[in-house]
Image: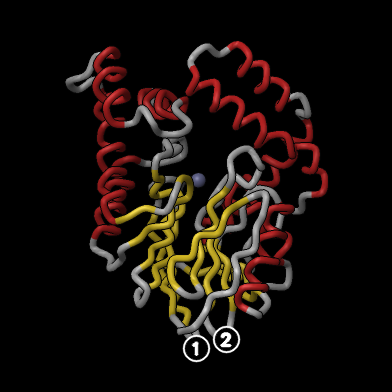
Amino acid sequence: MIMEKALPASRFFRLEPLCQGVYAAIVKDGTGALGNAGIVDLGDRTLVFDTFQSPVAAADLKTAAEYLTGKPVSLVVNSHWHNDHVLGNQVFEGSLIVSTDATRNLIKERVSSFIQTVIEHPEYPDYLFEMAEKESDPKRKDEWIRNANDARHAGEFHLYRLTPPNVTFREWLWIDGSKRSVLIQAMGGGHTEDDAIMLLPEDRVLFAADLVTVGFHPAMKYGNPDAWLDILDKLCEMEFDRVVPGHGTVGERKDVEVMKQYISNIKQAAAGIGYSRQDVIQCVMAELYREWASPGLFWANISSLCQR
Ligand SMILES: [Zn+2]
């Protein structure tokens, strides 16, 4: 029996082993890490999937990956352009940082303006704490507090350097390692204008980034719900048993079905098909999604679709 090394601890994330040499890095709330990441030991190389929002958290991820695999991180994958998955790139300078062409362009276009906006609004975390004070609903209060704590690292943003991907692909990329192989597949626009996943066929593990969330409301503001549903159908055809989501805990195949149901519910609620506002609260929210984190996104998702 081959023993795994003891898992390194981080204040930003906890590592969940999925099989030997494959780890989900599940973020801890309110630390500024924000989006889940992954570590894959390819044998001759080490790969990291997504890099959190905080470079300080990403530095912990790099240290953990190098400790666990005994090799430097030579490959980084960015699933999509959102800052909470790519702003840690700067600690992997010198590595190959891989994304689709479109995601690279979106990172260059949008993430630098996000950094600038945060620097120009140092009052934002205080505003979120004030909103938490005023909130009476306990779930929403938790959400405000978590968001406020996540925003507290805004003071570090002047140290952030936009580090876009330096290798791009259009459709898919197959990386053959000496220990295992991975498929990085462009899925088109669903959660954002362009999303990619990573499949470990031999290990039956899917890194789905924000195309799948588990126990956590997804963000649909930049998405296309119809295309997203088509992508989820394609994910269901892939061979995997466990899915690492962009937000929430490690899930199973059924969680992809749950995500399909969620997006269908949001579409129906936005279209007013068979739902009154009260129905949405009582039937959809109460029964299915009451325990999910970030409940404010539920209403934001409905209203973003209503405005189209
Ligand atoms: Zn995202």
164 lies left or right of 236: right
Marking on residue 23 = none
Task: List x then y, in percent, for residue 251.
Answer: 36, 53
Disc 1: which residue: 178
Which image quarter is the C terminus in? top left
Residues marked 2 and 1 touching at CB (< 8 Å): yes
From the top left corner, tell me how far across and down residue 304 is, in percent: 42, 27
Tell me if residue 53 can be seen. yes
Q: Residue at x 63, y 37 (%)?
A: 30
Dot 2 lies on which element? Answer: loop
Q: Is residue 266 left or right of residue 14?
A: left
Residue under the point 28% across and 12% down: 278
Residue furthest to the bottom in view is 178
Of residue 88 and residue 13, the one placed in the foreground of this image is 13
- Amino acid carrying label 2: it is Asp
Residue under numbered circle 2: 44
Rendered position, 16 above or below 297: below
- Residue at image location 55% in from the left, 67% down from the top: 39
Residue visible at 77% across and 50% down in the picture: 160
Q: CA distance from mark 2 to mark 1?
A: 6 Å
Dot 2 or dot 1: first in sequence order is: 2
